[in-house]
Structure formats: C-alpha cells, structure tokens
Image: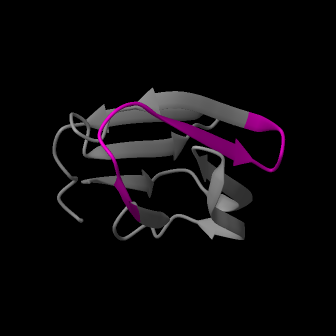
Amino acid sequence: MSELTIALEEGFRGQHIVVVVDGDVVLDDPDVRTRLQIGLARSIPLRLSEGDHSIDVRVDATDRLNMRVDPGVTRSVRISLAADGSLQAVTGGDLPGYL
C-alpha cells in the first residue's frame, strides 16, 4: 500500500465539494473554505495499492476534474479553485510543506 494525499488548497469559499476515488466517496462537504493563513481547505490522506487510481472532484455539482494517479509515483494531488471557477491540479512526488 502507498500513501496519497489529496489537498484542497486555494480559492474555496463555501462550495460543496465531492471527492470520489475509484468510485468511493472520500469527501462530501457542503461548505469547503480555504484557511487563508495556510492556503489549505481540506487534506484527505489515503492508503491505496500501487497502480492507477481514478480521482473525480466535483464542485457544486457543476464543475468537475477527472484524473488518474499512481500513488507509487505520486504522493500528493494539490487542487485549487481558480477565479473563473475551474479546478486546477498539481501532482507531486513529495508532500507540500504544510502536510
């Protein structure tokens, strides 16, 4: 098993966020807000088998981001909500400094 952290970071101001990994809901929060002091809204630590896994992030049931990651290679998925309402994701081999 490998660890993967999904971090909801900048731009969240009370949106309803649903995060689904491999068909299982891992977060369903109707009021996600970024804590401006640290630039983080939520952190979701997961233990997953190595190999590709599907991640689906939905904002207010209107915008959505789909991606595949291998936690054997990628340790973090950092997701922000841009001013235009689109979701932006950055993957990395290391965890962000605040985690």
Left or right: residue 59 versus residue 24 is right
Residue 82 position in % (x across, y down) = 58, 37
Q: Is residue 24 above or below residue 69?
A: below
**Residue 84 can be seen, yes or no:** no
Q: How many marks?
A: 0
> From the image, which quarter does the C terminus lie in?
bottom left
Q: Nearer the viewer, residue 98 or 70?
A: 70
> At x 52% / y 28%, what residue is drawn?
67
Residue 98 position in % (x across, y down) = 23, 65
Residue 27 position in % (x across, y down) = 61, 64
In magenta segment, residue 92: no
Q: Is residue 78 above or below residue 54?
A: below
The residue range painted magenta reads 45-63
Left or right: residue 83 versus residue 74 is right
Colouring method of the image: one colour
Q: Is residue 26 above or below residue 95?
A: below
